[in-house]
Amino acid sequence: MTDELPPTRPARSAPPRSAVPSSRPRATTAVPASSAWREGDDVGRRLFADVGTFDLESGARLPDVRVAYETWGTLAPDGSNAVLVLHALTGDSHVSGPAGAGHRTAGWWEDLVGPGAPIDTDRWFVVAPNVLGGCQGTTGPASTAPDGAPWGGRFPRVTTRDQVAVEIELARTLGITSWALVVGASMGGHRVLEWAILGPEAGIGVESLAAIATGAQTTGDQIAWAHPQIGAIRADPRFRDGDYYDAADGDGPHVGLGIARQIAHATYRSALEIDTRFGRIPQGGEDPFTDGRYAVQSYLDHHGDKLARRFDANSYLVLTQAMLTHDLGRDRGGVEGALGSITARALVVAVDSDRLFLPADCARIAAGIPGAEPLRTLHSDFGHDGFLVEHHQLGPLVAEFLPEPSPARD
């Protein structure tokens, strides 16, 4: 469920407590009511495709859907080198490349995607869309509804299958009839698995897939962690039932969004890393026995503020609720029956310290897909975020799994 930008890879073990930084200056600039990309903002590397009207699983109809996406590399004449990369909860289409105009942060997986990287864009044509319901250019709550106002709280509920249906139309628009690889982690892994079934049903092949730190259905434990995150946003008086886009900076639901992120972030890291890195150390210059914080509290405050400055509260709700609907086996005879119907080659990767998507969740996928390789496991102290941090382990697994593409020619 995470998409925290990977830091420079640390040592194998978590840093000693002495490495905890001194007190981080608190942000002084007001947090925007929403940090969604809005029409008229710099597009950066984004491309846009209008993919039509969709009848959603909820029964609602969503008109004039637009998808923001980015591409790297050149599509081979026979289309054999297309790769689809699917982002996690608060990610977007900016998989690779620097921060700059139109992009608040650098690419979230550029250690895996780019020239000479494991998914080498000198050989592969890579497509990365922003998910339906997101806030970085694809139709979502911050987008303009037919009446000219932002959708806001009126944006309909969407499911993982709705999101993949939109991505299927994007592939058709791009003229792609088969993916050599569909790859994603966490929430992106949910869509990878749905693609493996819905893509071929729609006439778009999926030759291979890589499902990383993910599951075949959302568990009760994951729903339990998501529930207070949803509640924190809705309880923020500045949420205004989702209609806050005209609010001034500092007057949006950033407190609720920040708390939701803090809850989530605690599940993205392992207990070992948090206790080894922070323990009970007070934040520099603060006294927890009066009004001060422990270092780990400062760390979570920082990540809550950081997300509020690059994301949107409504999208966080819509995407979290979509994750709750994820069940590959729904109306398909159960999870094992659905997994058994997948014909693609599969690489399934777990993180041994992941306490959100347990290694057992990944093992179930590997055991159920007939063409899956044996489960691979990343050894990491960094929990779920190991799929972002441990690129030295993950990269070779993906590179070795990829088939040989046809040469890309103009």
Image (cartoon, helix red, strand yellow):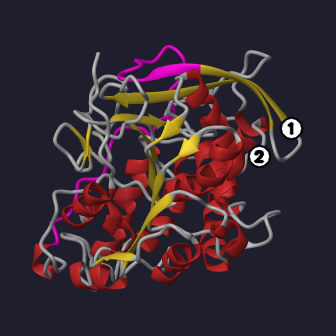
Q: Is the residue 7 above or below the residue 299 in the image? A: above
Which mark, residue 157? 2
Q: Is residue 24 magenta?
A: yes
Q: Which residue is mark 1?
A: 60
Q: Position of residue 397 (x, y in %)?
A: 28, 63
Label 1: element kind: loop
Whether residue 388 can be seen here? yes
Q: What distance separates the C-alpha of mark 2 from that of mark 1?
A: 8 Å
Label 2: element kind: loop
Q: Is the residue 52 above or below the residue 265 in the image? A: above
CA neighbours of label 1 inside 10 A, class few (<14), some (14 to 19), many (20+): few
Label the magenta part by its dominant secondary structure. Answer: loop
Q: Please tell me which residue is depicted at 16% across the width and 62% down the height of the picture.
A: 9
Q: Amino acid at mark 2?
A: Arg
Q: Is the residue 396 above or below the residue 48 in the image? A: below
Q: Position of residue 17 (x, y in %)?
A: 16, 81
Instruction: Indicate the quadrant where residue 15 lies.
Output: bottom left
Give 305 or 338, whichever is nearer the viewer. Answer: 338
| Number of marks drawn | 2
Q: Please tell me which residue is depicted at 32% across the width and 68% down the height of the picture.
A: 386
Using residue 303 as the reference point, say whether residue 11 is left or right of it. Answer: left
Q: Position of residue 279 (x, y in %)?
A: 27, 85
Instruction: Indicate the quadrant where residue 406 lies.
Output: top left
Whether residue 237 can be seen here? no
Q: Is residue 282 magenta?
A: no
Using residue 313 as the reference point, say whether residue 292 is left or right of it. Answer: left
Residue span colored magenta: 20-49
Q: Which quarter shows the C terminus?
A: top left
Kindly indicate whether the residue at mark 1 contacts the one at mark 2 (C-beta within 8 angstroms). yes
Q: Amino acid at mark 1?
A: Ala
Instruction: Indicate the quadrant where residue 231 lies.
Output: bottom right
Label 2 vs 1, first from the N-terminus = 1
